[in-house]
Amino acid sequence: MSEIESKKSKELSEKLNNELADMSNKIKDVEQKSSNLKSEISNLNDSLNNEILLSNEIGENINTLSNAKLEVTDSIALKTAELKKLEGKSSSINSNDDISKLNAKLEESNNLQSQLDGLHTQIENKNLVVSGKISQINGLNSKLNPLDSQIDLLKQRKANLKKQYNLELENINSSLNNNELPKSTELVDNLNNDI
């Protein structure tokens, strides 16, 4: 190999080495973006799980309050029946106490209904939050898939550049005299360390 060919081969080798370094940096950048997206997805999944747990807890509270409301409603119906029964037996019986108890039960029933309405609103809001988080996760996943493809493509390009670089190094080594061989070996070692 002539000196001109040897010089061109060295220049090509250095160019390929620079391209390999650039490719490695691009891969690291894309992998970092991918890692950040995966971390964000993980955080959203955690948040989503917390929202689902809160929704389940609110659902349990709704069931508890519904049962309590049924008990109060049953009690109201019973007291109403007793009151009507007492009114029918004697007009001299004072039913103000029974009416007060009935009014208290009605007020308790209304309070339970207000609490139930509030819990239903909370669960609707939680469902909206969960839907929003699911949409965010889907959006991030749609960004993640192209990044994974880009990483694969960049790695393939890097592998091709490395093969081309190694071929050039072999050409250089075969053309170098014994004085230039240590420099070439050092260049190879530096490249391998960089990669």
Image: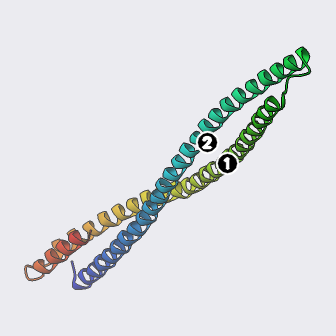
Mark 2 vs 1: CB contact within 8 A: yes
Q: Position of residue 48 (x, y in %)?
A: 54, 49
Q: Which mark is residue 58?
A: 2
- Left or right, residue 182 beside residue 32: left
- Left or right, residue 46 beside residue 171: right
Tag 2 secondary structure: helix
Tag 1 secondary structure: helix
Splitting the image into 4 quarters, where does residue 116 fall?
A: top right
Quarter containing the C terminus: bottom left
Of residues 109 and 62, the one drawn nearer to the viewer in this rendering: 109
Q: How many marks?
A: 2
Query: Which is more N-terminal, label 1 or label 2?
Result: 2
Q: Position of residue 54 (x, y in %)?
A: 56, 46
Q: Which mark is residue 122?
A: 1
Q: Residue at x 76, y 37 (%)?
A: 104
Q: Tell me: residue 37, above or below residue 61.
A: below
- Left or right, residue 63 beside residue 34: right
Q: Which residue type carries mark 1?
A: Gln
